[in-house]
Image (cartoon, coloured by chain):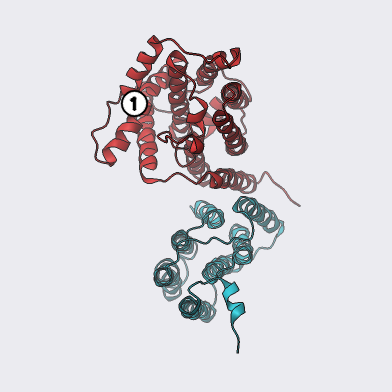
Chain colours: A cyan, B red
Amino acid sequence: MIFVLIILYAITLIYFVLSERVAKFIVLLSIQGFLLFFIALNNLIHIQLFGLVLILLETIGVKAIAIPWFLTKIRKTNKLNRVHESAVPVFYSIIIITLLLVSSFLVSNIFHCRTIQIKFLSVALASVFGGIYFIIIHKNIFSHLVGYLIIENGIFLLSLAVGNEMPFMVSLAVLLDVLIGILVIGIFLNKVGDTFSDISVNSLSKLKD
Amino acid sequence: MIISVILITLISIIFPGIISKTKAKIVGRKGPKVLQVFYDNIRLIKKGSVYSNTTSYIFQIAPIIYFSTILLATLFIPFGNYKALLSFDGDFVLFAYLLALGKFFMIIAAMDTGSSFEGMGANREAYYSLLVEPAFFIIIASVALLTNNTSFFDLFNSMHLDTELSYLITILAIYVFLWIAMVENSRLPVDDPKTHLELTMVHEVMVLDYSGFDLALIQLANGLKFSIYGALIFNFILPVQFSLLYQVLIFISIEIVFALVVGLLESFRARNKMMKNPQWIISLSAIAVIAFFSVLIISGKLILI
């Protein structure tokens, strides 16, 4: 089951670069949240109950429901429908993300370390680099926010790869970090939207003292 | 075994009808009879064909070659644990190139008419076929890698839904084959068979000059192509220990469900913009590549160090 979930997660990365609709980004983030929930449930079932409940709440409560709900609110407030300005044509982006996934599969298989779970590491690396690539090719703040969340999901998988569980405090800190990050960027995005009626980062170059 | 050819041919008669009926029901219309497309084809077969003076013999032989290559391709499809009429190592390569040969003749026939619209449609058809072909080969290569076989019959017979990897490959293969069938038959989201604007057409614009018997052959061949892909999906998911009667019933059910799914997809999906099609089609190959490398790594066939 775990391989099916991991590969489905990898496929969502392809759909991230294929999509141009903001609503689809949000749906894909929510799907990733649910996939991470099932991956965590499958992998961490034996850990202590409190830690497990927290991680499951983090995945399904925050990643799959709360963040997509908040992003949908931002999308509606700013009337965002499509992301037009990708710096690289989508056709090439799909090829690049596939190469990224394949090289991440190959690189992680070179590791022969008992403490690293290769199955998670392979997709985690792809997700982190995929998120960075997603941020690079887009110019608007909302896409940067989505890219940031893809990276965060990759870090969650990385935490599963390097150990069975992150220490409780680290997990809580990452969760808080992400939530505050999303809230701050969300408010920032709303303000930029109000001021410029456009959320492209190009608009920010017009700011003066 | 001849049964697969008979069943595929019979199902191909009702396949387009089920799609139209599903689409009609969803929009609240009564819709044509399931066999209406077949009756239309019978009517067309009784008619003669009209040929333009600007066309050559290529235009006249293309529909026959198109139909016969697809009919020949059905001989390669096994039926559960019964071998196909033609089965040998690497038969899936010939299968794919038989379909490509038929398409090639349709493309050059469209260019033979000298119509700029048909040339444009032929160009698009060739481009989309080129993009979708890697997806087919990579997904079949993944199954070949998993089962260590290279013929359709051995591939499907050694593929048991017992490991996690086999489930993964089956899910991805069904998903990729479903969309390959849509692209190969020029259906939504790549092309819209209902469209009346030549500028946005792919397949329909290529066959604009055909009439009567030739048009009937092309439409029958399209139905056949759909039911061939349905048969491939059936072979992926059928447990081989079932008796022949059950296999036949499962085959018919899967084909009907496949037609219903196509109808549903066509009802709820909009056609892609023409310029978005290549990126959408290449994503199928990307998914197939992921499946291929997953098999390679999980089955331990790739040893890096």
**Residue sitting at 55 percent across and 28 percent down?**
B118
Question: Percent position (x, y) of residue B143?
Answer: 57, 37
Question: Percent position (x, y) of residue A198?
Answer: 50, 71
Residue type at mark 1: give it.
Leu
Q: Chain of mark 1?
A: B
**In this view, B177 is above or below A136:** above
**Residue sitting at 66 percent across and 57 percent down?**
A104
Residue furthest to the front in view is B53
Side of A84 relative to A33 (left or right): right
**In this view, B152 is above or below A129:** above
Assess disc 1: are there few (<14), some (14-19) or many (≥20) residues with their C-alpha within 10 Å of its C-alpha: few
**Residue sitting at 23 percent across and 33 percent down?**
B30
Side of A65 relative to A200 (left or right): left
Mark yes or no: residue B22 visible: yes
**Residue receiving disc 1:** B249
Mark yes or no: residue B143 visible: no
Question: Percent position (x, y) of residue B291?
Answer: 58, 45
Q: Quadrant of residue A144?
A: bottom right
**In this view, A5 is above or below B141:** below
What kind of element bears circle 1?
Answer: helix
Question: Percent position (x, y) of residue B266?
Answer: 39, 40
Side of A76 relative to A178 (left or right): left
Which residue is at the front of the view, A131 or A7? A131
